[in-house]
């Protein structure tokens, strides 16, 4: 059991850089999600780890063993790293049995292992079918079993649930994670689906344009994003302009004292900011703004809750999702619109007046910080 | 999987065909075992000491259905095994030229003299002994003894009997380029027989007249064909009314289609006319195999009375050996023009080709 | 997702194997250059500057271009109609459309001349050659179309595009590589064809080459003309690479023949049947007429017929296998790697296909006598000649079928512990096999029909159906020739029919 480590990996396609100075540690036995939009380089990173691509710069190691250094690399068949590609990619000319057993030597042990895995993925009766006869979910499970068969130390999954419908995706994802935990396999999951990453991973690495922007636990990344872009990618946001004020927020009814203390997932409030939502407690993410400086303020919709002591707002739109609704408000006296997540079934109607308060430190970023990390 | 079942069937097919093909193609000629070999330079000494292994390879530019029965007779009579390679004369000539001294062939039977001339020029033919060369009229054989003529074929006019009356036919070679035949005459200028006809014209009437005739032909929009048989087919189908071919093709077609079905008819121009010149088919011995006595035996056979009569009977060609009756119904050989030059002389041929090239009839 | 990798270098062993192939197939080219070099420059220029040479060169290029064009349009149209219009016997129709492959061009022209004597020149040559070569486009395009769905076209139709335009915008890009590759084969074939154009009296470079042998016994002049053919081929092969385009992978839903009705059914049927009619039915009818009028209908020598058939089939199978062995390394190289050297190797491999059979034959006479005299006039050299001559027919489909195997599959195999060669053998090869099979079948059919090189190189006394046919027709014995002609067409029709049914399974991956 080893820690997989990527240090300063760099890689380009011709003149277009795909990975720039990427460093990531994947602790043994954990599941790390690499989250990012299409084209951010996450698949390239995965393929470099698998040994299917050469790096230009950087090192990839598994424990003491060096897998890639600069342009030299250990070939993929010697790495003991399994790979589940984006679309199952089962060998169409082989049966399910032969697909699963592809990486195993022939023999009785192989048959046993294949049957074992078939049971694990719940497809025991399907061993003699051909890939063309499987549904999307079934194929994905076979692909997983195939990758697991040679008992790899590390498993790489490239958007494995992308082609499935949401219900299936959810159940399959849970099943897969359970299998990985049972077999104690280190896994790297690449996805653009934030909910998937937050739900399944022990650690999330957010990537954009070939760089790792933030690494942390799902809660860390969600509650304490490093940049506004990460914030908006990992969850819904409400963005406002504001002015920074040093010092703790003095208020009686806002309840800031309750949520301003530091927790394991976020530092505590470092000041307060004046914005459309009023004067609210805030955390400046990773820097210290000047008093009176103009700043960007980011809050999440679920941090805005109905409160009699809150600001006045009027409902302008309701986006119903069954379990809750994303409600759009005009803030009284301000030109900003904010959205808040209101739990069902007591949902407001359009035109209704409301009072909202923030129950979480607002996140504050420099105005000049780009969506992509400078 | 269906594609795999198909692959399996294909493999079975492949395997069985392989077996079949391997058996069939394993017919290799037996390796000749030579007993004694002494390379002779002069023709006179050839008979003294030579190899005789009862085996000879013949390259034949004449077709199998004609040659095989004759050679079968030879094989039975002489006990010599003859393996025959059939192909077109010019292709075989090119092959022998390419093979050079490594050619496995001992004897080359050629449809025309030009091919033999080409081989002779390349030094690949062995001079034949006088006893063979002297059998044939010197007008119809090589001037240097490198090959000997076997059969003669007359140049003739073939015409469409349904649309042309015999009275309207040209009475001499110049009549062929008269305006009324514009666009109606079929010729095969690449063919050796046409070229030797033009050469005959040059020899008999002079260069200027020949030049005039060729240019007259070209002005007259001649219909160009690849070979004589194609011209005959065209006349017989009514495509063109007049053509210049060798006489025996007509007889060949008649035996296939029946005399009643022959729309095309032959017309021999009067004696002495260049257009009635006689070409020959001939045979030569390749120098690389000059020590092979069996080759000599074979060539001797081809100019023997027996073989000559065979040709007369089978293809209606002229025998070139005295004492054999010409084919029935044809003008005797003596009445037709002899070329008046060595038919295989490539230098003469080259000049003719320059003339034809000048007017765009060949490259 | 395609694995766009940074530029990869091909493995040395693959390059080595490809080089072996290329060296072997360039033997005829070396011969041609050698013969040309034997004559002084001045003479070469004299030959090239003869106006007739210019004429026949133009004739050659014009005919080849015209035939390729018609074969391309016709092939795509026929393939489109057969796969898109709902016919009850769709499979049978495709089979029928493949049949013109089985008829040698010289037989087709002869048959037509019996029915319509006097036809000659450009137009009949063009039309008849198109009819017999159109399957080279029809078959691969039909196979490619089967792997696509008509959905995209249907969408285009709802957007207001007419059927032709929808096809052009949506489906054509997907079948373009297959179509262009087929058209290339047609072009090269037309360049080298002699029998048909000679009979129809249309003077091309091959006519000139034949005349050089027949009239002046001038192998060097013939070589100059052959070199001209090679140069023309070079230009076109290089052009095909750029016209080929990228293979666009499709997200194919597996349903195919939706009834889109681009043309009314009877008209579609007519279009599909034109080539088989012109290329098979009418020539056979002509032969039949000759047979009826023949007095030399001898008794059929069954053992001789059987022997010739066995030789023909056996050689065809051997030639197909060897051609495939030669083609696969170059195809594998060209399918996965790019670069000037790879392009050069592939181009060289195509060139001998433009050279007429007689020159190929002579080149191998020369080569085998120079290098391995004991092998001269043995089956080995003849099969070798076939493989060299026809390997390009297998090259295009081999390359396309290897290309169609997703690199992802190979990558997965690598991560499962398979070394590169093992991954190739266990994954790429089985999936590319149907496409390789198509190539092998094309080579087999061409071998069965081949004549000039066979006449030159066959062991003395060994005959194929084609040489037996030739020997009788050159003696005017059409009655005796008929059984051989019929059997040749029948035997060659078998692989043609198998061809029409081969389905590329590479498309059906999940």
Image (cartoon, coloured by chain):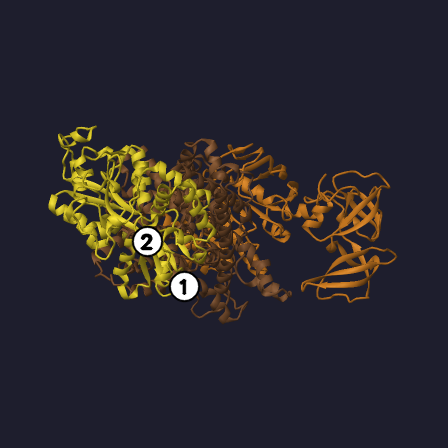
Chain colours: A orange, B yellow, C brown
Q: Which residue appears at 44% of the width and 34% of the height?
A: C12
Q: How many discs mark residues in the rendered view?
A: 2
- Chain of the residue where label 1 is placed in the rendered structure: C
Element on which disc 1 rests: loop
Looking at the image, which is closer to me, A32 or A272? A32
- The answer as to whether the residues below labels 1 and 2 share one chain is no
x and y percent of residue C419 in the render? 43, 40
Task: Give the label on residue B269, or none.
Answer: 2
The residue to which callout 1 is attached is C116
Judging depth in this view, the residue of B53 and C216 nearest the camera is C216
Q: Chain of mark 2?
A: B
Of circles 1 and 2, the one toward us is 2
Q: Secondary structure at mark 2?
A: loop
Q: How many residues crowd mark 1 within 10 Å: few (<14), some (14–19), many (20+)?
A: few
Residue A214 visible (yes or no): yes
**Left or right for A372, reference B48:** right
Residue A295 sits above or below residue A125 on the image: above
* Residue B166 in the image: above or below residue C32: below
């Amino acid at each position: 059991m080893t820690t997989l480590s990527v240090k300063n990996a760099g890689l380009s396609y011709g003149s277009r850089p795909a990975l720039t100075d990427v460093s990531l540690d994947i602790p043994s036995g954990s599941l790390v999600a690499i989250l990012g939009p299409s084209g951010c380089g996450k698949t390239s990173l995965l393929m470099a780890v698998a040994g299917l691509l050469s790096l230009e710069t950087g090192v990839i190691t598994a424990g003491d063993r060096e897998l890639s250094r600069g342009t030299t690399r250990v070939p993929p068949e010697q790495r003991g790293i399994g790979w589940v590609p984006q679309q199952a990619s089962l060998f169409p000319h082989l049966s399910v049995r032969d697909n699963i057993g592809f990486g195993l030597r022939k023999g009785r042990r192989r048959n046993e292992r294949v049957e074992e895995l078939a049971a694990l993925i719940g497809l025991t009766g399907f061993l003699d079918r051909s890939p063309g006869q499987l549904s999307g979910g079934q194929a994905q499970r076979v692909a997983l079993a195939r990758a697991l068969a040679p008992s790899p130390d590390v498993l790489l999954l490239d958007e494995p649930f992308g082609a499935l419908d949401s219900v299936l995706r959810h159940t399959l994802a849970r099943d897969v994670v359970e299998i990985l935990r049972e077999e104690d396999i280190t896994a790297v999951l690449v996805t653009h689906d934030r909910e998937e990453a937050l739900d399944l991973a022990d650690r999330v690495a957010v990537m954009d344009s070939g760089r790792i922007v933030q690494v942390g636990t799902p809660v860390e990344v969600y509650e304490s994003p490093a940049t506004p872009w990460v914030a908006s990618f990992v969850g819904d946001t409400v963005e406002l302009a504001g002015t920074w004020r040093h010092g703790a927020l003095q208020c009686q009814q806002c309840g800031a004292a309750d949520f301003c203390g530091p927790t394991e997932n976020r530092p505590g409030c470092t000041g307060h900011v004046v914005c459309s939502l009023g004067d609210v407690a805030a955390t400046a993410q990773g820097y210290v703004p000047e008093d009176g400086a103009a700043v960007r303020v980011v809050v999440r919709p679920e941090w805005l809750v109905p409160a009699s002591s809150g600001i006045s707002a009027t409902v302008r739109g309701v986006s119903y999702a069954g379990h809750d609704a994303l409600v759009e408000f005009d803030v009284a006296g301000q030109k900003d619109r904010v959205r808040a997540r209101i739990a069902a079934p007591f949902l407001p109607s359009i035109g209704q007046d409301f009072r909202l308060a923030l129950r979480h430190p607002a996140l504050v970023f420099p105005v000049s910080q780009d969506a992509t990390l400078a | 999987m269906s594609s795999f079942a198909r692959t399996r069937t294909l493999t079975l097919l492949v395997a069985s065909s392989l077996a079949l093909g391997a058996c069939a193609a394993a017919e290799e000629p037996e390796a000749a075992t030579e007993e004694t070999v002494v390379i002779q330079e002069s023709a006179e000494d050839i008979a003294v000491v030579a190899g005789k292994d009862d085996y000879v390879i013949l390259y034949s530019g004449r077709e199998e259905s004609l040659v095989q029965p004759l050679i079968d007779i030879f094989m039975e009579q002489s006990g010599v095994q003859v393996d025959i390679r059939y192909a077109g004369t010019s292709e075989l000539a090119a092959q022998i030229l390419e093979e050079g001294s490594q050619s496995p062939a001992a004897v080359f039977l050629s449809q025309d003299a030009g091919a033999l001339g080409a081989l002779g020029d390349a030094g690949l033919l062995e001079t034949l002994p006088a006893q063979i060369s002297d059998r044939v009229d010197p007008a119809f054989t090589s001037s240097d003894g490198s090959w000997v003529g076997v059969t003669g074929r007359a140049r003739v006019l073939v015409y469409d009997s349904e649309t042309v009356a015999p009275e309207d036919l040209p009475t001499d070679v110049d009549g062929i380029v008269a305006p009324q035949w514009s666009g109606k005459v079929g010729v095969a200028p690449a063919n050796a027989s046409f070229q030797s006809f033009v050469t005959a014209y040059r020899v008999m009437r002079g260069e200027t007249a020949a030049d005039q005739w060729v240019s007259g032909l070209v002005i007259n929009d001649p219909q160009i064909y690849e070979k004589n048989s194609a011209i005959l087919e065209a006349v017989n189908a009514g495509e063109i009314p007049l053509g210049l071919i060798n006489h025996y093709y007509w007889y060949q077609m008649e035996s296939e289609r029946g005399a009643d079905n022959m729309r095309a008819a032959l017309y021999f121009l009067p004696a002495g006319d260049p257009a009635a010149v006689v070409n020959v088919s001939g045979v030569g011995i390749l120098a690389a195999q000059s020590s092979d006595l069996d080759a000599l035996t074979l060539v001797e056979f081809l100019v023997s009375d027996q073989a000559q009569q065979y040709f007369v009977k089978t293809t209606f060609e002229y025998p070139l050996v005295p004492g054999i009756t010409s084919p029935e119904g044809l003008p005797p050989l003596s009445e037709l023009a002899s070329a008046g030059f060595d038919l295989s002389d490539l230098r003469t041929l080259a000049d003719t080709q320059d003339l034809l090239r000048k007017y765009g009839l060949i490259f | 997702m395609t694995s766009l990798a940074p530029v990869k270098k091909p493995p040395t062993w693959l390059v080595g194997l490809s080089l072996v192939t290329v060296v072997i197939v360039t033997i005829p080219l070396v011969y041609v250059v050698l013969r040309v070099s034997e004559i002084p420059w001045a003479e070469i220029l004299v030959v090239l500057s003869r106006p007739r040479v210019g004429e026949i060169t133009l004739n050659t290029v014009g005919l080849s271009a015209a035939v390729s064009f018609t074969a391309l349009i016709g092939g795509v149209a026929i393939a489109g109609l057969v796969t898109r219009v709902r016919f009850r016997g769709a499979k049978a129709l495709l089979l029928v459309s493949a049949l013109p492959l089985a008829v040698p061009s010289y037989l087709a022209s002869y048959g037509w001349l019996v029915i319509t004597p006097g036809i000659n020149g450009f137009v009949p040559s063009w039309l008849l050659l198109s009819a017999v070569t159109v399957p080279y486009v029809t078959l691969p395009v039909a196979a490619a179309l089967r792997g696509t769905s008509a959905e995209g076209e249907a969408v285009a139709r709802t957007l207001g595009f007419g059927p032709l335009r929808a096809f052009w915008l949506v489906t054509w890009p997907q079948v373009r590589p297959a179509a262009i590759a087929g058209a290339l084969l047609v072009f090269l074939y037309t360049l080298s064809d002699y029998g048909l154009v000679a009979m129809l009296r249309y003077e091309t470079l091959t006519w000139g080459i034949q005349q050089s042998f027949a009239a002046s016994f001038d192998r060097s002049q013939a070589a100059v003309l052959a070199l001209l053919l090679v140069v023309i081929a070079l230009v076109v092969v290089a052009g095909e690479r750029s016209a080929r385009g990228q293979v666009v992978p499709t997200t194919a839903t597996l349903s195919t023949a939706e009834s889109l009705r681009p043309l009314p059914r009877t008209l579609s049927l007519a279009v599909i049947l034109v080539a088989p009619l012109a290329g098979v039915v009418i020539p056979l009818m002509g032969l039949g007429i000759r047979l009826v009028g023949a007095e030399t209908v001898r008794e059929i020598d069954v053992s001789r017929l059987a022997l010739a058939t066995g030789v023909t089939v056996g050689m065809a199978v051997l030639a197909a296998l060897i051609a495939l062995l030669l083609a696969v390394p170059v195809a594998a190289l060209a399918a996965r790697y790019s670069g000037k050297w790879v392009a050069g190797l592939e181009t060289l491999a195509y060139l001998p296909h433009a050279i007429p059979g007689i020159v190929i034959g002579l080149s191998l006479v020369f080569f085998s006598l120079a290098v391995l005299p004991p092998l001269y006039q043995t089956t080995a050299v003849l099969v070798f000649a076939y493989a060299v001559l026809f390997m390009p027919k297998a090259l295009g489909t081999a390359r396309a079928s290897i290309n169609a195997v997703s690199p992802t599959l190979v990558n997965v195999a690598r991560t499962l512990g398979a070394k590169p060669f093992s991954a190739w053998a266990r994954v790429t090869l089985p999936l590319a096999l149907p496409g390789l099979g198509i190539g092998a079948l094309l080579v087999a059919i061409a071998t069965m029909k081949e004549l000039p090189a066979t006449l030159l190189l066959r062991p003395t006394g060994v005959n194929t159906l084609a040489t037996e046919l030739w020997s009788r027709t050159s003696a005017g014995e059409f009655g005796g020739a008929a059984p051989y002609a019929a059997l040749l067409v029948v035997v060659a029709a078998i692989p043609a029919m198998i061809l029409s049914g081969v389905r590329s399974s590479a498309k059906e991956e999940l």
